[in-house]
Each structure stands twice: as structure tokens, then as C-alpha cells.
């Protein structure tokens, strides 16, 4: 299942990705002190249940690594079959 970037905030330094099924989002934002926060929010209704994680890192590059890792770790197997 894919993640799609749904929000890019040029002015406020916020980027957000939504999982294809709509049950989870990952948001990356810059804090006023220059550090970066990445958060995962998966709804209770998701097949694998609710989950909330937040990680604070020192650079955008580190934040991008967290986003990439979480997109992979919190993805859902694509159960569709080719006909």
C-alpha cells in the first residue's frame, strides 16, 4: 500500500503523508528552535489498531529518514491480486 504526500506547507515547514487506506498519517514539521518533529497517527479503526508516535530530531535530513522508515514499518500489505 502506498503513502501519498497530502500536504506541503512551504510557509510553515509542515509536510504530511497519508496512507492509501486513509487510516494513518505521518507529519513532519520544523519547530521554532530549529529541530524537527515527525509524528505518526494511526486511527483506532485501522486494521492493526491505533498507534501514536512522535520523534524529535536535529535536522530535516534525519527527519526524512524517520519518515521513510515509518512509511515502510507502518505500511499495510497490499492484498489486491492481479486479475
Image (cartoon, rainbow, N blue to C red):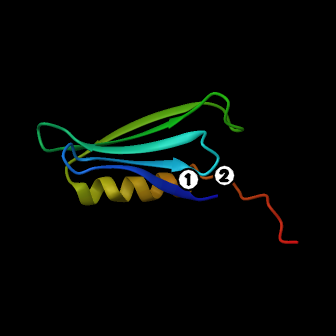
Give the percent coordinates (x, y) of residue 29: 27, 43
Q: Residues within 10 Å of mark 1 (few under 14, many from 20)?
A: few
In this view, which residue lies farthest toward the right?
83
| Mark pair 1, 2: CA separation | 9 Å
On the rendered structure, is 44 left or right of 68? right
Q: Which residue is mark 1?
A: 73
Residue 63 in the image: state x and y as whole percent.
Answer: 31, 53
Task: Name the image quarter holding the C terminus.
Answer: bottom right
7 or 40, nearer to the observer:
7
Label annotation for residue 15: none
Residue visible at 72% across and 59% down?
A: 78
User: Percent position (x, y) of residue 57?
Assistant: 25, 46
Instruction: Classify mark 1: helix, strand or loop.
Output: helix
Q: Residue furthest bottom?
A: 83
Disc 2 secondary structure class: loop
Q: Residue at x 71, y 56 (%)?
A: 77
Residue 76, which numbered label?
2
Determine whether, in the image, residue 76 is placed left or right of residue 37. right
Residue beneath the point at 41% across and 53% down: 67
The image quarter in which residue 12 lies: top left
* Count of all numbered marks drawn on residues in the image: 2
Estimate the x, y position of residue 53 in percent, counting from the top left. 44, 36
Please rate how many residues cluster around mark 2, counting C-alpha atoms within 10 Å: few if below 14, some from 14 to 19, many from 20.
some
> With 35 as the anchor, is 65 left or right in this view?
right
Q: Quadrant of residue 26?
A: top left
| 41 relative to 11 in the view: left or right | right
Amino acid at each position: 500500500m502506498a503513502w501519498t504526500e497530502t500536504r506541503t506547507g512551504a510557509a510553515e515547514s509542515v509536510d504530511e503523508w497519508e496512507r492509501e487506506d486513509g487510516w494513518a498519517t505521518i507529519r513532519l514539521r520544523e519547530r521554532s528552535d530549529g529541530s524537527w518533529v515527525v509524528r505518526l497517527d494511526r486511527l483506532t479503526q485501522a486494521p492493526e489498531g491505533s498507534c501514536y508516535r512522535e520523534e524529535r530530531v536535529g535536522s530535516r535530513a534525519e527527519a526524512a529518514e524517520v519518515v521513510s522508515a515509518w512509511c515502510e514499518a507502518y505500511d499495510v500489505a497490499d492484498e489486491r491480486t492481479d486479475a
